[in-house]
Image (cartoon, grey):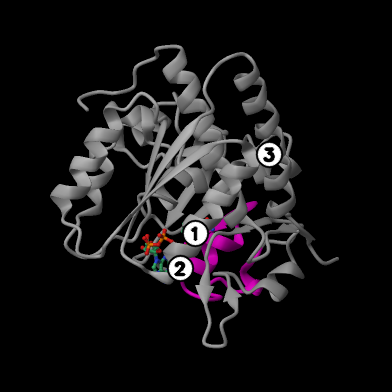
């Protein structure tokens, strides 16, 4: 029987509608709406689209978004100085720097400059570390979004065998930590993994975040598995394709995410959830600010 679609678009819309209710209740109670500062450096067209989508989603949820649209020639010192100002601005609850950055700016320095309590992307080593020690606070948006998708179709992930393909700092690694936190037995595969097919074939849950179209073949999927495709690959004809052979995998899996309409919208919804959480942490004077 063909797999059922794990509909990230539908779930993200429900999450954003629920956030709108929570934000409105907050404002009615006399508190400020959560505010997200978005820093965009340069005019990469894909980044421009992502930033626009995030701002539109903020609008729907009642979250205030402030765009800093900086020229491609902006120096690292200028970006770090802006983040420093925003860290100290109590009217700003979340700070997002759209990646990729121009080559003169080191993304690691930028991520580390953001105060962990305002790190709504969940990329700061402090926040990844909290996830590693089972104290998640601001969680990396894409892996957190994947967990919410999985929760839609599995009551309990304990004891399931999960394979994550891809080990980047912002997707693969925190994804493995999320699945571990949920009680899965986790294997992380990456560019040096031998016999990727054998690892995928024994997995109840497969999450793929590589950036290579259809790297994971449908024939590798264990019958009845849940397949989450994080990959977004722009093809020559302009269409989008994931990292999994969608139709063939769908013949074997029980659940599979589409691309587009699977993980992408969930990433945006989790960004907004994190922004509300950051505002709540600030209200409660729970300082997650280390040295910023
Ligand atoms: P990355 O380039 O930072 O990391 C890729 C990972 O894939 C690396 O860990 C590498 O070791 C691994 N890899 C490369 N070749 C491999 C192979 N042959 N077998 C196994 N592993 C291999 O990429 P990323 O930033 O983590 O993004 C991965 C994909 O996810 C991209 O397509 C990106 O556009 C997409 N993405 C989507 C969302 C979303 O919201 N849907 C968010 C972030 C990234």
For label 2, the crowd category at 10 Å Cα-Cα, with few meaning under 14, some 14 to 19 and many 20 or more, is: few
Coordinates of residue 38 in the picture (x, y in percent): 40, 46
Coordinates of residue 267 in the picture (x, y in percent): 55, 49
Coordinates of residue 143 in the picture (x, y in percent): 51, 46
Name the residue nearer the viewer: 292 or 38.
38
Residue numbers of the magenta segment: 196-221
Q: Quadrant of the C terminus?
A: top left
Secondary structure state at the residue bearing disc 2: helix
Q: Can you see residue 102?
A: yes
Ligand 1, image quadrant it occupies: bottom left
Closer to the N terminus: mark 1 or mark 3?
3
Ligand 1 is within 8 Å of the C-beta of the residue at disc 3 = no
Instruction: Answer whether residue 33 is magenta in the image.
Output: no
Judging by the rendered image, the residue that carries numbered circle 2 is: 46
Q: Quadrant of the N terminus?
A: bottom right
Tell me which corner region of the image, top left, top right, bottom left or bottom right, holds residue 18.
Answer: top right
Alpha carbon distance from label 3 to label 2: 24 Å
Judging by the rendered image, the residue that carries numbered circle 3 is: 15
The residue sitting at 51% across, 26% down in the picture is 277
Q: Can you see residue 210?
A: no
The residue sitting at 50% across, 64% down in the picture is 49
The residue sitting at 50% across, 44% down in the picture is 141
Q: Are marks 2 and 1 in contact (CB under 8 Å)?
A: yes
Q: Which label number is shown at residue 50?
A: 1
Secondary structure state at the residue bearing disc 1: helix
């Amino acid at each position: 029987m063909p797999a059922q679609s794990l509909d990230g678009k539908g779930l993200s819309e429900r999450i954003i509608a629920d956030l709108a209710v929570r934000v409105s209740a907050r404002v009615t109670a006399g508190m400020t709406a959560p505010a997200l500062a978005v820093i965009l450096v340069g005019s990469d067209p894909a980044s421009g689209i992502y930033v626009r989508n995030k701002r539109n989603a903020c609008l729907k949820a009642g979250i205030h978004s402030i765009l800093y649209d900086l020229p491609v020639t902006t120096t690292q010192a200028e970006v770090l100085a802006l983040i420093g100002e925003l860290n100290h601005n109590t009217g700003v609850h979340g700070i997002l720097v759209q990646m990729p950055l121009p080559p003169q700016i080191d993304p690691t320095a930028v991520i580390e400059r953001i105060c962990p309590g305002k790190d709504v992307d969940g990329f700061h080593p402090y926040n990844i570390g909290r996830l590693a020690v089972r104290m998640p606070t601001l969680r990396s948006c894409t892996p957190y979004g994947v967990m919410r998708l999985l929760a839609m179709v599995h009551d309990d992930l304990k004891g399931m065998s999960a394979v994550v393909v891809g080990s980047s700092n912002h997707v693969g690694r925190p994804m493995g930590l999320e699945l571990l936190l949920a009680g899965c037995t986790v294997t992380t595969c990456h560019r040096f993994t031998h016999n990727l097919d054998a690892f995928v074939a024994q997995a109840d849950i497969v999450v793929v975040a590589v950036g290579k179209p259809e790297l994971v073949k449908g024939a590798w999927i264990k019958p009845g598995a849940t397949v989450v495709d994080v990959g977004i690959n722009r093809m020559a004809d302009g269409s989008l394709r994931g990292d999994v052979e969608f139709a063939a995998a769908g013949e074997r899996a029980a659940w599979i995410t589409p691309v587009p309409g699977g993980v992408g919208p969930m990433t945006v919804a989790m960004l907004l959830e994190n922004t509300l959480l950051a505002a709540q942490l600030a209200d409660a004077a729970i300082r997650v600010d280390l040295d910023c």
